[in-house]
Image: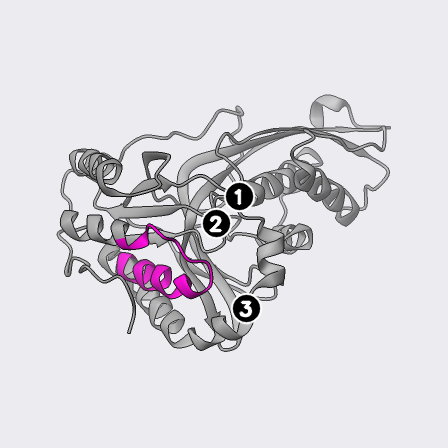
């Protein structure tokens, strides 16, 4: 007897990103650690008996992910109707495509009564396109191109992200296909240094180490996907004694990493608008743990400021560097 359609619906929320905390090459393999933020893509699915899978015309990757998930679960004869809501612009490094894809995978599995292992979600996502690591809980090192390895690092500390949007767009698939792997490999020492700092920052709940790691990675990426405004953003970070600066390594966005203080974030927004060239929008959010959310009632995850009242002081504020040695 066929299942009723009421039992074959699900909604998933997946965090989007402000680029990556670290991305590069380690031991000859490309990797990234995404910077998940408190903004979410919402993907709802209805599994049907029609055999047709459809969704918004501007979300073909989510549709492809749903089809792959049906095939993986042995239900290729079924279909899925998708609805996708992710209001951040595409092609700028906000992780919109990965959020759509992971949401489609998770929601399709849940609608069929399956909670897919995160490793399966990752492999299905990478089969659609190079992906962020936002399917993993907390922060994770992820082979975003092949999905062949990953390492979960731990939970995120309290950290504000002031997102700097410079407009434009970059096609992730085209960028990864044209990536200069030689240039990437020559920066591997910097990538390894940044990754070690990030590991320490997560284990010790030290946002200063995380910010330093992100800054090193952003600077190292200038030879691969240069951000003309990065020197100005580093100068703002130094004046505010920020933890650091993160970058969309295959996008256009940058972010200021700050202690979770609303007044400081407001100052950062004002300062960025005043002194950073090319800025089209800026807004404040916070670092969150990765991983898809599937609320029982379908409600959106909370997007609120932390209740923390005590904020640590940076061990070392970043300096006015505009290039790496």
Q: What crowding class fits label 2: few (fewer than 14 Cα within 10 Å), some (14-19), or many (20 or more)?
A: many
Question: Dots 2 and 1: beta carbons under 8 Å?
Answer: yes
Say whether disc 3 or disc 1 marks the residue closer to the N-terminus: 1
> Element at badge 2?
loop
Place of residue 242 in the rendered image (x, y in percent of width and height, measured from the top left) = 20, 50
Identity of the residue drawn at 41% across and 46% down? 253
Question: Dots 3 and 1: beta carbons under 8 Å?
Answer: no
The part of the image, by quadrant, that contains residue 322 is bottom left
On screen, residue 117 above or below 109: below
Residue numbers of the magenta segment = 211-231
Would residue 281 be found to the left or right of residue 178 on screen?
left
Tell me the tag on residue 192: none
Specify whether residue 85 is painted magenta.
Answer: no
Mark 3 sits on what residue? 180
Place of residue 190 in the rendered image (x, y in percent of width and height, measured from the top left) = 36, 72
On screen, residue 229 above or below 99: below
> Element at badge 1?
loop
Give the alpha-carbon distance from disc 2 to disc 1, as whole Å. Answer: 6 Å
Say whether disc 2 or disc 1 marks the residue closer to the N-terminus: 1
**Residue 216 visible to an observer of this rendering:** yes
Identity of the residue drawn at 52% across and 43% down? 169
Place of residue 168 in the rendered image (x, y in percent of width and height, measured from the top left) = 48, 41
Would residue 147 be found to the left or right of residue 321 on screen?
right
The part of the image, by quadrant, that contains residue 44 is top right
Mark 1 sits on what residue? 91
Q: Nearer the viewer, residue 39 or 177?
A: 177
Give the alpha-carbon distance from disc 3 to disc 1, as whole Å. Answer: 19 Å
């Amino acid at each position: 007897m066929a299942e009723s359609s009421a039992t074959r619906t699900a909604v998933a929320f997946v965090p989007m990103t402000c680029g990556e905390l670290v991305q590069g090459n380690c031991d000859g393999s490309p990797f990234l650690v995404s910077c998940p933020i408190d903004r979410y893509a919402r993907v709802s699915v209805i599994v049907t008996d029609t055999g047709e899978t459809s969704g918004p015309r501007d979300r073909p990757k989510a549709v492809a992910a749903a089809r792959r998930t049906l095939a993986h679960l042995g239900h290729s004869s079924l279909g899925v109707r998708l609805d996708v809501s992710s209001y951040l612009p595409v092609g700028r490094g906000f992780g919109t495509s990965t959020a759509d894809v992971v949401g489609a995978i998770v929601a399709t599995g849940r609608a069929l009564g399956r909670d897919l292992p995160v490793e399966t979600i990752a492999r299905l996502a990478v089969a659609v396109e190079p992906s962020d690591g936002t399917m993993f809980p907390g922060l994770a090192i992820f082979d975003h191109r092949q999905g062949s390895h990953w390492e979960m690092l731990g939970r995120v500390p309290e950290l504000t992200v002031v997102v700097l949007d410079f407009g434009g767009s970059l096609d992730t698939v085209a960028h990864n296909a044209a990536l200069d792997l030689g240039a990437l490999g020559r920066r591997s020492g910097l990538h390894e240094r940044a990754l070690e700092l990030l590991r320490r920052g997560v284990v010790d709940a030290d946002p200063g180490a995380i910010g330093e790691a992100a800054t090193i990675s952003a600077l190292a990426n200038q030879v691969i996907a240069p951000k003309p405004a990065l020197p100005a953003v580093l100068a703002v970070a130094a004046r505010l004694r920020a933890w650091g600066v993160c970058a969309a390594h295959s996008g256009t966005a940058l972010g200021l990493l700050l202690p979770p203080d609303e007044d400081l974030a407001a100052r950062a927004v004002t300062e960025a608008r005043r002194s950073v060239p090319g800025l089209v929008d800026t807004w404040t959010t916070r670092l969150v743990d990765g991983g898809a959310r599937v609320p029982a009632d379908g409600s959106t995850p909370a997007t609120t400021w932390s209740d923390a009242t005590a904020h640590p002081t940076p061990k070392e504020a970043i300096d006015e560097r505009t290039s790496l040695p």
